[in-house]
Image (spheres, rainbow, N blue to C red):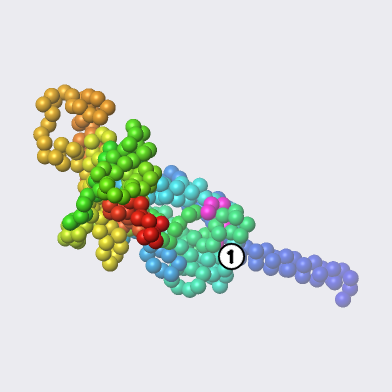
Amino acid sequence: MNARNLLMLGTATLLAVVLALLLVDRAHEPVSGERDGELLPGLAERINEIDAMEIVAPDGRTVATLHRARERWRMREKYDYEADFARIHDLLRDLAAARRLEARTANPEWYPRLGVASPGEEAGGGILLRFPDSDVPSLILGKRDPAEIGRYVRLEGREQAWLTGRSLDVPVERMEWLERAIMDIPAADIREVSVRRPGEESVELRPGDAEGSVWVMLDPPADREVKQAWQLRQTANALAKLNMADVRPHEPASVPADAVETVFTTRDGMLFSATTFTDEAGDWVHFRVAGEEAASGSGASEDPATAEGEGGSVTAEEAAGVEIDIVAVDGRLSPWQFALESDRFERLRPTVEDLLVAPEGSGEE
């Protein structure tokens, strides 16, 4: 073989190798439409059309079925109770802004390492996010990138996994998807508190100053010392930033005869009646909201234009506004029973003894 033929053979061999490498690269290259760009193309323009989401945990368990109804996002697994709008809004916003930064594996054998395997099928499964009744593709969310760039993801039914620059917070605890805030009424807005236990002496608390920062107990036992004012204020502040641990529909038959009723009267004349009790499922409270006149059974003011309030005269328009608030708040709270953490539960229903200093030599602090 002469030099010319040898050179031609070498050139042909080199071209074959280069062609083979190009074919290998293209075989692993993302298909058209899956190159770097939006993670969910077009979602930003259709984000307000999304009215349902389903979250499936890595073990295959359905975490939440969320849908829009009656002007709210709601969760089917919790009796259509209101979902956390802020969390849903933030997730949809992040999904609309998420981009495919880097293509990762398209080999299913490597999915578990990134956490993007299908939920419930094998170790390394991800969180599945579906959009029922929509053409938005389902998404499997895997592990967060160790470099804290973002999160590994894969469109359901597609082989290619990606790194996206968004962390995409999708909890797998059901309660994390509910609106857990019940109400937020600080002690400064409370005028009086009354705790009524069947067969026991009632606890009556009043503010000792105009700001409601100091509280006193009415008619304490003459031979006992009442705890410090700030400790009494904890009961008056029991409705401040009150969050639930669980929720269920209210069933009057489930309330036992020994339930405790605590009535909080606000400075604007609203009565929040909290009925507390314990069963095998936890510590529960049920709220009813009324106005002072309705609670006392009295009629309307003789002068329909004005009524006397703590701060002076109240116009008929202001009084009507309070009545509207009462109906709205009662309509939101009274259909439900809320489970509370034990410390908040106890703050709602103190006994007389709870608010007194322990006698010397009792061994109590």
Give the x, y percent position of residue 157. 46, 64
- Residue name at image x 61 percent, y 60 percent: 146
- Residue name at image x 77 percent, y 67 percent: 14
Return the residue nearer the eye: 106 or 243.
243
Q: Which residues are magenta?
A: 160-167
Question: In what quadrant of the picture does the C terminus appear?
Answer: bottom left
Circle 1 residues within 10 Å: few <14, some 14–19, many ≥20: some
Give the x, y percent position of residue 307. 18, 27
289 relative to 101 in the view: left or right: left
Disc 1 residue type?
Answer: Thr
Dividing the picture into quadrants, the one containing residue 113 is bottom right
Q: Residue furthest bottom?
A: 1
Return the residue nearer the eye: 151 or 81.
81
The residue at which mark 1 appears reads as 105
Dividing the picture into quadrants, the one containing residue 361 is bottom left
Q: Residue furthest right?
A: 3
**Magenta-span inclusion, residue 161:** yes
Give the x, y percent position of residue 214. 36, 39
Return the residue nearer the eye: 199 or 76.
199
**Magenta-span inclusion, residue 212:** no
Q: Is residue 57 above or below residue 242?
A: below
